[in-house]
Image (cartoon, helix red, strand yellow):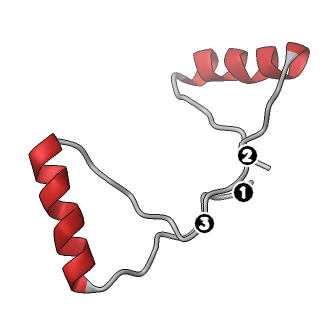
């Protein structure tokens, strides 16, 4: 199983700026060092993942 990339290591003043926007928008922002490439699945492969999502009650993201 692959994991998402590491959360970026940011200086405190950068974190404060992000926290302000989070508060203003009512969202949680996550800063990653580098985003992975998302897989583009089709047909039976996509059907298999969607069936698993339904079975488990979760949302899955396929990355390469």
How far is the residue under mark 1 from the one under mark 3? 14 Å
The residue depicted at 72 percent of the width and 57 percent of the height is 2
Sequence-first tag of 1 and 3: 1
Q: Which residue is mark 2?
A: 63
| Quadrant assignment for the N terminus | bottom right
Callout 1: 10 Å neighbours few (<14), some, many (20+)?
A: few
The residue depicted at 27 percent of the width and 49 percent of the height is 28
How far is the residue under mark 2 from the one under mark 1? 8 Å
Q: Which mark is residue 2?
A: 1
Please tell me whether mark 1 sits on a helix, a strand or a loop.
loop
Residue 57 spot, x, y in % from top left: 51, 22
Q: Which residue is mark 3?
A: 34
Sequence-first tag of 2 and 1: 1
Residue 34 spot, x, y in % from top left: 60, 66
Specify whether 41 is left or right of 50. right
Residue 10 spot, x, y in % from top left: 36, 80
**Foreground: 55 or 47?**
47
Q: Nearer the viewer, mark 2 or mark 1?
A: 2
Specify whether 56 is left or right of 64. left
Q: Nearer the viewer, mark 3 or mark 2?
A: 3
How far is the residue under mark 3 from the one under mark 2? 13 Å
Specify whether 43 is left or right of 63. right
Which quadrant of the figure has residue 56? Answer: top right
Q: Number of labelled discs?
A: 3
């Amino acid at each position: 199983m692959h994991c998402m990339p590491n959360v970026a290591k940011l200086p405190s003043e950068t974190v404060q700026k992000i926290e302000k926007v989070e508060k203003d928008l009512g969202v949680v922002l996550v800063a990653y060092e580098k985003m992975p490439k998302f897989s583009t699945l089709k047909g039976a492969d996509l059907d298999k993942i969607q069936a698993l999502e339904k079975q488990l009650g979760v949302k899955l993201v396929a990355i390469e």
